[in-house]
Image (cartoon, helix red, strand yellow):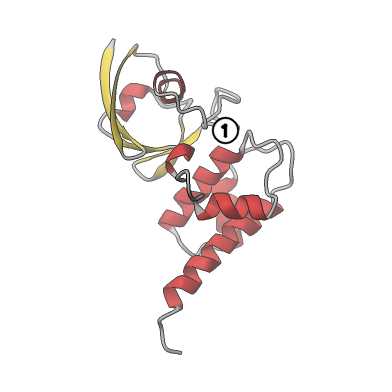
């Protein structure tokens, strides 16, 4: 067993894990964070996507010991009980998801993109979401939601500027 300590959604967490334990299994089974889903278990579907040190990763492919000392953000870390994250709210407003299984991974992938590039093009959004599979919807409403968040951020950033 190996002891791992990581920051999950802003909170220091420690667990003892076997060497083959994935980050996904640690999050779901040890920490009770079930928003990240086990889909394909080979990194193809993106349902398990989380952010590690600001980058989106497939948590089914990352060992828990590789996350030792790192900062992890899951879908549970985006919202509060009082307020959804803007991405979550716009995904809801635009009807971007149906069953919701892929939603956490897609939203985390979009968050990682917007953190790195607050004003992405449609092509950049498509590239960022390419690792996430959805069997229920087309991706157009998801892309619209990400564009709307980017646009709102751009409007907020330019609200005080003089034309």
Instruction: Tell me the residue that label 1 is attached to.
Output: 47
As drawn, is 1 to the left or to the right of 42? left
- Is residue 1 placed above or below 159 in the rendered structure? above
Observer-nearest residue: 32 or 43?
32
- Is residue 159 placed above or below 86 in the rendered structure? below
Q: Which residue occupies 46% across, 46% down?
A: 79
Q: Residue 70 placed where, x, y %?
A: 29, 35
Disc 1 residue crowd, few under 14, some 14–19, many 20+, Cα 10 Å:
many
As drawn, is 149 to the left or to the right of 162? right
Q: Residue 89 placed where, x, y %?
A: 57, 53
Q: Residue 52 placed where, x, y %?
A: 37, 38
As drawn, is 96 to the left or to the right of 117? right
Q: Which residue occupies 25% across, 32% down?
A: 69
Q: Which residue occupies 60% across, 26% down?
A: 39
Q: Quadrant of residue 14?
A: top left
Q: Which residue occupies 32% across, 29% down?
A: 67
Q: Residue 108 placed where, x, y %?
A: 50, 43
Mark 1 residue element:
loop
> Residue reaching furthest bottom?
163
- Is residue 54 placed above or below 133 in the rendered structure? below
What is the total number of numbered labels drawn onto the structure image?
1
The quadrant in which the N terminus is found is top left
Q: Quadrant of residue 15?
A: top left
């Amino acid at each position: 067993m190996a002891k791992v300590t990581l920051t999950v959604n802003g909170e220091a967490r420690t667990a003892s894990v076997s060497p083959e334990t994935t980050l996904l299994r640690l999050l779901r089974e040890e920490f009770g964070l079930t928003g990240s889903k086990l889909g394909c278990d080979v990194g193809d579907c993106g349902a398990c996507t989380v952010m590690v040190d600001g980058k989106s990763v497939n948590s089914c492919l990352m060992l828990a010991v590789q996350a030792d000392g790192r900062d992890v953000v899951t879908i549970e870390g985006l919202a509060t009980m009082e307020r959804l994250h803007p991405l979550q709210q716009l995904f809801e407003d635009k009807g971007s998801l149906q069953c919701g299984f892929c939603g956490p991974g897609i939203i985390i992938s979009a968050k990682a993109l917007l953190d790195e590039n607050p004003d992405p093009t449609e092509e950049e959004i498509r590239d960022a979401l390419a690792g996430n599979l959805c069997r229920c919807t087309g991706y157009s409403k998801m892309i619209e939601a990400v564009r709307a968040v980017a646009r709102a951020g751009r409007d907020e950033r330019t609200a005080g500027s003089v034309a």
